[in-house]
Amino acid sequence: MNLDSALRIGIRRRLRRISKLLVLAAIGAFGVVGNSSMPNGTATLSVSVQGDRLVDANGHAMQLRGAGLAGLESGVIQEAIPAQPGCVTAGQARPPPGGAQATYACTDQTPVTASAVPYGSSSSGTSGGSLSSSFGSGSGSSSSGGKPPGAFGVKVSGNHFISTLTGATVQLRGANVSGLETGIIFGPSNSTNFWASSGLTGGRPDFTKLGAWKLNAVRLSLNEDSWLGLTVKGIPGNTIVLHGAAFRAEARATVAAANAAGLYVILDLHWSAPSNFAANVQNPMADTDNSVNFWTSVANTFKSNPAVIFELFNEPYFDPVAQADGAFNNVTGELPNTAANEMLRNGGTANYYFGLSTGTWGGSERRVSYNWSVAGYQALINAVRSTGATNVILCGGNRYSNDLTWWGQNPPADPAGQLGAVIHLYPNGYPNNFTTGAGGSAQFDAMIAANTAKYPLVVTEFGDEVGNPNAAFTKAVTAWLDLHGYSVTAWAWSASPQSSNVLLQNATSYPPTVGFGQTYHDWAVNHP
């Protein structure tokens, strides 16, 4: 008998013993069943079916009058269990009151230390409904990637999102939480310091703080190497062994914690690299070596959770060649570029990949000659749908997800009909900027019109300078979002000391930054 079988048998036996004790306690407390009064704790009770009614041992008709008692469905799984092979320590799966740090025994050979969601807390998502949080980061939901409490979710209906519970229109209003894409890719081997570069404190973010801003969504950036648990090689030849099981467990627990706070979750493939090269910077597009396997695994993990959305790639960039630093020797020209747009859908061949010169944190970005196969959006969509997942899928465009003309020229196909389009907006940073571009908002709206007529649009990244109270760009973006009902996740929910694109002054009391943070906060909290 293996350890897993022994644990399962032990759990079943304990459940039976606890069930008997609860029945005896109930009999002793009430002492009344049907129409028969009995001395407390002295009766031998039975019930059977007779025709269309229940009868007791004496043949008297019975009407069961009681109440449901929750706990057995989750109680044992949240108790301490012995450490499994490969785990550092045994511990308690159920986090202590108050959401303190908890180390718990792992389900896939992974010790996990995490800041848990407090038991019994509740939070309301703006469009996701009111959710009662009855599980923490060590629960069955986090280990399976399964449905959130209340099974709230989102799906595509025409060119907008609707709630899977109520059918009401949903506008995603959220923030990016960065960290998982970078946390362990810099080493050392088998690191579990997942949130080292998040710009927050205390490990996994406290998602209830996003709820305090009345946000209803969070975008989490992932790294395909970390998820798959590859042994990767840096440019200088250094090797890093990535603890994939631990990373996947943390990702599942993070999604569960976000759902428990009432948030929809967008999972984004942020960093990737072909072969076994370390994905420690942004490459121009997904690769066939790892990205297809990544999305197959992610989709299998979260396919029963309709509150999870899949953004297939962060920011493709290989049009024009100057922006891709020559990664694609066969792609040239300016917008619109048919060859680049076709490659976005169908894939192609790249001639260089990118990585850090040191192979770890602190190096400079370098281009390395290596021919590799690009995975186009259609291959990634097919990988997700091959698992049976019907989750919403998001696809961006070229020029760092700022150009959607490819979609009109080479539209992707989704058998589930659950596609949404992505755009990224930063001031003065892209050719298609609806406030500072040559044609202004009219030109920008025309560029995306073919998409927004048929598909929902999500601005999965936008940022602004910090320190200027006017925040003109943020005001323009948020007014435009509301005018059209588009969704958004701002970059980023972080307190990193930067002059732009951060929402928080600090990660202790969570005050918004002057300008960008304050303006976005005020816009969000003034929504119903």
Image: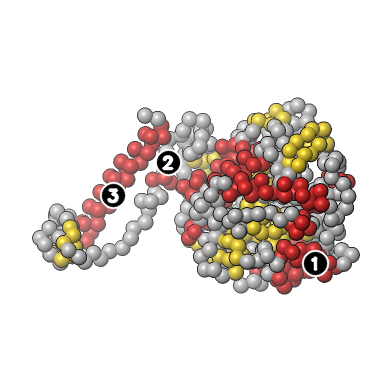
Q: Secondary structure at mark 3?
A: helix
Q: Which residue is mark 3?
A: 19
Question: Sequence order check: which comes first, mark 1 or mark 2?
Answer: 2
Q: Quadrant of the N terminus?
A: top left
Identify the residue at horizontal 63%, vertical 66% (top origin).
158
| Residue 123 - label | none
* Residue type for callout 1: Ala
C-alpha span from label 1 to label 3: 64 Å
User: At which x and y percent is residue 18?
Assistant: 30, 47
User: At which x and y percent is residue 244?
Assistant: 60, 36
* Residue type for callout 3: Ser
Q: Quadrant of the C terminus?
A: bottom right
Asked whether residue 357 appears in the rendered view, the answer is no
Q: Quadrant of residue 442?
A: bottom right
Q: Which residue is mark 1?
A: 446
Q: Are marks 1 and 2 in contact (CB under 8 Å)?
A: no
C-alpha span from label 1 to label 2: 58 Å
Query: How is the rendered protein coloured?
Result: secondary structure
Taking depth in this image into account, of 223 and 292 the one nearest to the observer is 292
Q: Is residue 11 above or below residue 440?
A: above
Q: Which residue is mark 2?
A: 80
Q: Quadrant of residue 356?
A: top right
User: At which x and y percent is residue 215?
Assistant: 63, 63
Q: Secondary structure at mark 2?
A: loop
Question: Sequence order check: which comes first, mark 3 or mark 2?
Answer: 3
Asked whether residue 315 appears in the rendered view, the answer is yes
Nearer the camera: disc 1 or disc 2? 1
